[in-house]
Amino acid sequence: MSDSMPVFGRRRREELEAAAAMPALAAAAPAAPTPEASRFPADTSTSVRAEIAELRNMCLARMDATAVAALPPERLLIEVERLISDLATDKRVQLNAREQRALATELVDDMLGLGPLEPLLLDESINDIMVNGPDHVFVERSGKLLQVPVRFRDWAHLTNICQRIAASVGRRVDEASPMCDARLKDGSRVNIVLPPLAIDGPSISIRKFSKKPIDFKKLIEFGAMTPPIARVLEIAARCRLNIIVSGGTGSGKTTMMNALSRFIDATERIVTIEDAAELQLQQPHVVRLETRPASLEGKGEVTARDLVRNALRMRPDRVIIGETRGAEAFDMLQAMNTGHDGSMSTIHANNTRDALSRIENMVQMSSMGLTPRAIRQQVCAAVNLIIQVERQRDGGRRVTQVTEIAGIEGETQLLNDIFKLEITGETPNGRLIGRYEVSRIRSSFQERLQYYGLDRAWMAALEET
């Protein structure tokens, strides 16, 4: 190894014997030999695993954190491999080239990335990663949950990864504050729960950020919608209709809102409000706001409601709320009712009727003292369209309803299902088959369609079905 190597220094026997006394990275593993993650074959013997663990600890003891941080990942990997080779030779540990590369990759991932999760983050076929303690890791592929042979060394190793994720966005997670929402550098959304709340060990849930933005063309290819639905939703976005995207967890709400946002004019000023920023807006004039949790002293919290109120003072053309889940629903309705047409949000609900009920319940949380009828009138005046998306039993994510809020009679809100999916069967391989029922009655926002000159295009899209 080069004498000028700034990270590891010369290879001398006396240095190896004194390695435990030298500075190590904060992410260093415990000294005791422990089972390896999946980078090593399952049939790796116990004795080899113990030798690998010893080499890992010796490598970590030889590293200088400041020098490591200054190296690019590719160079660091080469140097770590050299160090492992030297240490293995000195200690007479028999590791082949593949095992040395596996150990070097694991060390670099631990120092610069998220350890055993790095291969999963690089796998584009994976949508979600769920860690239930150090020994149980699940992923979602094609709508199906699968357990993968990935393990962390122990609770401390997994906890260190959790704290690194939180610290990267200026947040903390520990026993005093055991829950945290965060995001990764690529925009992936992360939720962390630590013991004692998570009984079986630290829990991580990662919703991966799509590196390739998904538009309506892709959604049609995936079978999530038909071309007429895509055309209708495109017209709705261009006409500045206020839209709610409703659905369950992992049903594709954010993906749908990202696809809708592609039709917003580039000249518009957009303010987005999220708990963890994950929207992928393509427009040049976007202000991204993110909530902030309270400190350990209970101070400094900034809620979604605070941000919505502030957004209205920022001269937005549209306000987009990543998810409405509380009292900010009232302020969202105010934004939609006070000239910010084309605003959007997502909500958790099982169908479009339930979505309206949830909005009503959340407005009541704002303690404004409004009667149920007054709230329903505000909702009907503010919201034009609800898009229901669903992850179905075959793993597919589909638009199941596109519903117009047509008005209110007495205490009842009038809904018109422009499109409604009916499942008619399934293929031999379990893929669901369905068709859309279409309503072609005159829309309550017909004047808006005419104003933008898209009324004929709207009717043509309905006739295509």
Image (spheres, rainbow, N blue to C red):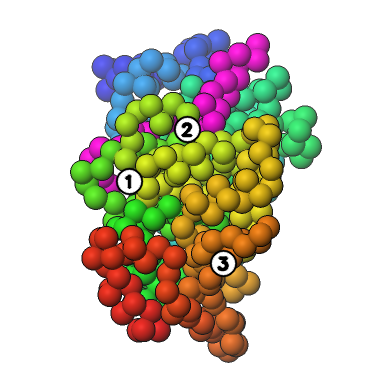
Q: CA distance from mark 1 to mark 3?
A: 30 Å
In the picture shown, does residue 266 fall above or below 202? below
SS at badge 1? loop
**Location of mark 1 (residue):** 281
Q: Is residue 316 visible?
A: yes
- The mark that comes first in sequence, 3 or 2, is 2
User: Which residue matches tag 2?
Assistant: 308
Q: Which residues are magenta?
A: 278-307
> Image check: 123 left or right of 248?
left
Judging by the rendered image, the residue that carries numbered circle 3 is 415
x and y, in percent, of residue 6 in the image: 31, 17
Which residue type does callout 3 highlight?
Leu
Q: Mark 3 or mark 2: which is in front? A: 3
The quarter of the image holding the C terminus is bottom left
Mark nearest the camera among 2 and 1 is 2
Q: Are marks 1 and 3 in contact (CB under 8 Å)?
A: no
- CB atoms at circles 3 and 2 under 8 Å apart? no
